[in-house]
Amino acid sequence: MDIEKQNIPCLITIFGATGDLSHRKLFPSLFHLYQQDNLNEKVAIIGVGRRDWSNEKFRSEIKLSIEKFVKDTHKLEDFLEHVFYQSHDVNLKESYDNLLQLSNELDNQFNLEGNRLFYLAMAPEFFGTVSDFLKSSGLTKVKGFKRLIIEKPFGTDLKSAEKLNTQLRKSFKEEEIYRIDHYLGKDMVQNIEVIRFSNAMFEPLWNNKYISNIQVTSSEILGVEDRGGYYDKSGALKDMVQNHMLQIVSLLAMEPPISLASEDVRNEKVKVLRAIRNIKPEHVRSYFVRGQYDEGVINGEPVQRYRDEDNVDPNSNTPTFVAAKVLIDNFRWAGVPFYIRTGKRMKEKEIRVVVEFKEVPMNLYYDRDKQLDSNLLVINIQPNEGIELHLNARKYIEGIDTEPIKLSYAMTAQDKMNTVDAYEGLIYDCLRGDSTNFTHWEELKATWGYVDTVANYWDEHPAPFPNYPAGSNGPIKSELLLSRDNFRWWDFN
Ligand code: BG6
């Protein structure tokens, strides 16, 4: 991280501290921030969980996770001295009274200047309850700042998201609520804005005059793992499209902000999300494709179908794949489809954006009837990180022909060394009070509004699932979605 270190004193309280996210992401990220001096001695972290653990037991568990996920562990013992544990029942007033007492003690001991950050990394049904108790117990009555980081899912539809938001707003102001979308913490997602707005060669072409379509893919090899219970109620539409996919679309499509201040960037994102054409129920089938994985083979190993996964209904109608054609009704994008595609148990792990440019007016070269290859700007987000520009260059045969060439830049391990994970940057942003890479309520409102129609239509019209084998690129209809418009998905592997 090359931003100036700010060393903000703070008490960080993590609800759900014994869970998977805390172990894999949050504590390794906090440790790395500490190790890099982005958190200093004036920090204390309380892990809150149901289990009846002591500080020592919690520290030893955290230590194991950190050693697993961070290579260089110097200063780990020092860091652990800032870590505490509180066994907690989210529905019990006494638990919050105890937490308040511990918080006040740590505030004095570590000189935290009354700054408090609460991180909800727990089952979403408790978000509202915890937030209410934080206020009624006096935990949010602070001398310094108070902030709330909240994990997804933020509601399961617009109505429940509104309800949750109203409840949170009783204890926190909008600017104190940091809704995580971990895609916004990814280096190459943050790079989209930089590529667009710091290069003279892209922005003039970034519109419906020169771009024919934009494709955003996020495919996973993994299935639902041990999250069947959650996933079967959510599915790819709510788990990925409503948040990560539409966030990437908004960054690709927004107008240049007047500055990089959170509010200016957000205003542009909200504007473009509102400009997405709402789908009428009778048009869902033309704009959206859903899929659910069948058994198949991945990396030579057989894998079971979705309906046989643990905690999944054997007749489940939940999509594990979604592709969609998103249209943005504004002057810049009218007529340019944004195709998005996401799925589990697919052929490869790939998060990628492809911007396809329109053809030149005519082919002057050898075979004039041949269509020239499209110019593409490819933004590789994960696991490869970098950009590629696909162009046409000279190929000598009897006449002059063209052949596609590729200019590419890949981020090196050196470039990536500074952070352990997207979460690290996001937590640091929150400590500094920078909400640019978090989801504002207005963005959520727009995306839930868009997705709800599709979800409702699908609930009412079950699909002939399963319809794609594990280890493939998804259902055939996903190819048809583009071929109908004379396009195709750009897959490079
Ligand atoms: C999460 C989803 O938000 O993103 C998961 O809940 C999904 O289902 C994950 O696996 C994908 O994240 P990434 O960073 O691996 O692409």
Image (cartoon, grey):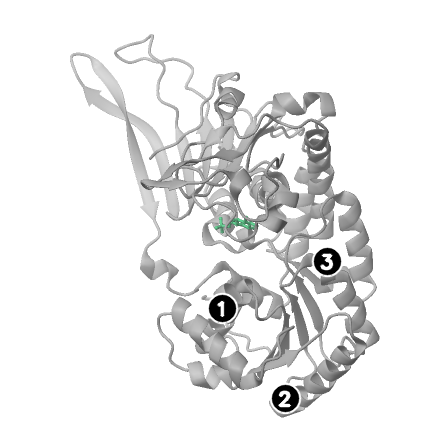
The residue singled out by tag 3 in the image is 125
Circles 2 and 3, Cβ within 8 Å, touching? The answer is no
Q: CA distance from mark 2 to mark 3?
A: 33 Å
Compared with 177, 331 (above or below) is above
The disc, 1 or 3, on the residue closer to the chain's N-terminal end is 1
Q: CA distance from mark 2 to mark 1?
A: 22 Å
The residue singled out by tag 2 in the image is 111
- The residue positioned farthest toward the bottom in the image shown: 109
The answer to whether residue 40 of the structure is visible from this angle is no
Q: Amino acid at mark 2?
A: Asn
Mark 2 vs ligand 1: CB under 8 Å?
A: no
Q: Quadrant of the N terminus?
A: bottom left
Circles 1 and 3, Cβ within 8 Å, touching? The answer is no
Closer to viewer: mark 2 or mark 3: 3
- The residue positioned farthest toward the left in the image shown: 398
Residue 462 image point, x, y percent: 66, 28
Residue 152 image point, x, y percent: 64, 54
The answer to whether residue 103 of the structure is visible from this angle is yes
The disc, 2 or 1, on the residue closer to the chain's N-terminal end is 1
Q: Residues within 10 Å of mark 2 (few under 14, many from 20)?
A: some
Dot 1 falls on a residue whose secondary structure is helix
Instruction: State the residue at coordinates (51%, 86%).
Output: 81
Tell me the quarter of the picture where residue 314 sits.
top right
